Amino acid sequence: MTDRPVDGEPVEDDLRDDETAPAPDERSTWQRLREGRRDRLAAALIGVLTLLLGFAFAVQVRSTGTPEALAGAREEDLVSILDDVNAREERLREQIAEQRTALEQLTDSDSQGATALAEAQQRATALGILNGTIAAEGPGITLTVLDPDGTVPPSALLNAIQELRGAGAETMQVDDVRIGVSSAVTGSAGDLRIDGRSIQAPYTVVAIGSAQDLATAMGIPGGVSALVRREGGEVRIEQSDDVVVDALRVLDEPQYAEPDDGG
């Protein structure tokens, strides 16, 4: 006869099984511990996978420009990389061309500036010789007008200056007075003046130009030499390959004339 429950009490075998099983509260705590261990393990695995993924990504980034990466790249990627390299090369070539052009322009500007400056200096020198503000030397003649009796009039010396100009004299001086375009010979026989400065006989005229042409101009019949002799004087001409005109002329300040601004 088997034992039956009496008044809800368990049989003896049931009590032995129940003694090995945990209480309801103890089972719940054990399950929570086991689930916590699973969560920590999953978190650790996720962390390791994340580290591995980051490492792989870093390696991929570093190996992008290597030959191995290019060898394994797709055709479209290779075409894109080649286009980028060609574009960079083209930009560099353009920059080099621009720098070369700028250098050439700078060199040309310096050369043109130097040429213009040299031309300006030459013109200034030529003008200085013509207007008497710069000393000059070159071939020419030395004309000496003797006037022992003081009878040679100012017109004789003025004719000599004009004839020398007509024969191609580039610059000249009489004694220590430089002759300019506005020079005037005044006074009277025996008391000649050039630009208000007194000169004394014998009068020495130094002119730069073709020595032969200047000497010929002074000796033409009825010219300067004939006029001076007629007035009681005498003319002596000496040609030279190198004469010096070193008397300087002080330019007058214009009183009425002003530079034209082109307006």
Image (spheres, rainbow, N blue to C red):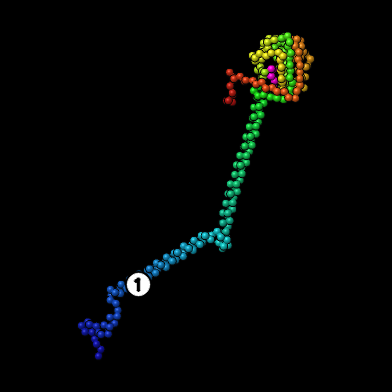
The residue at 46%/62% (across/down) is 54
The residue at 37%/70% (across/down) is 38
The residue at 42%/68% (across/down) is 45
Residue lying farthest to the bottom in this orientation: 1
Assign the C terminus to one quadrant of the image.
top right
Q: Quadrant of residue 17?
A: bottom left
> For this rendering, which residue is in front, 31 or 66?
66
Residue 186 at x, y percent in the picture: 67, 12
User: Is disc 1 surrounded by few (<14), some (14 to 19) or many (20+) residues within 10 Å?
Assistant: few
Assign the N terminus to one quadrant of the image.
bottom left
Magenta part, dominant SS: strand
Residue lying farthest to the right in this orientation: 221
Residue 165 at x, y percent in the picture: 71, 19
Dot 1: what SS? helix
Residue type for callout 1: Arg
The answer to whether residue 95 is left or right of residue 33 is right
> For this rendering, which residue is in front, 26 or 73?
26
The answer to whether residue 263 is left or right of residue 199 is left
Residue 124 vertical position relative to residue 237 in the rendered view, above or below: below
| Residue 172 covered by magenta stretch | yes
The answer to whether residue 131 is left or right of residue 226 is left
Span colored in magenta: 171-175
Quickly name the residue at label 1: 34
Residue 254 at x, y percent in the picture: 59, 19
Residue lying farthest to the left in this orientation: 7
| Residue 262 covered by magenta stretch | no
In this view of the protein, can residue 37 be seen by the observer? yes
Residue 255 vertical position relative to residue 19 in the rendered view, above or below: above
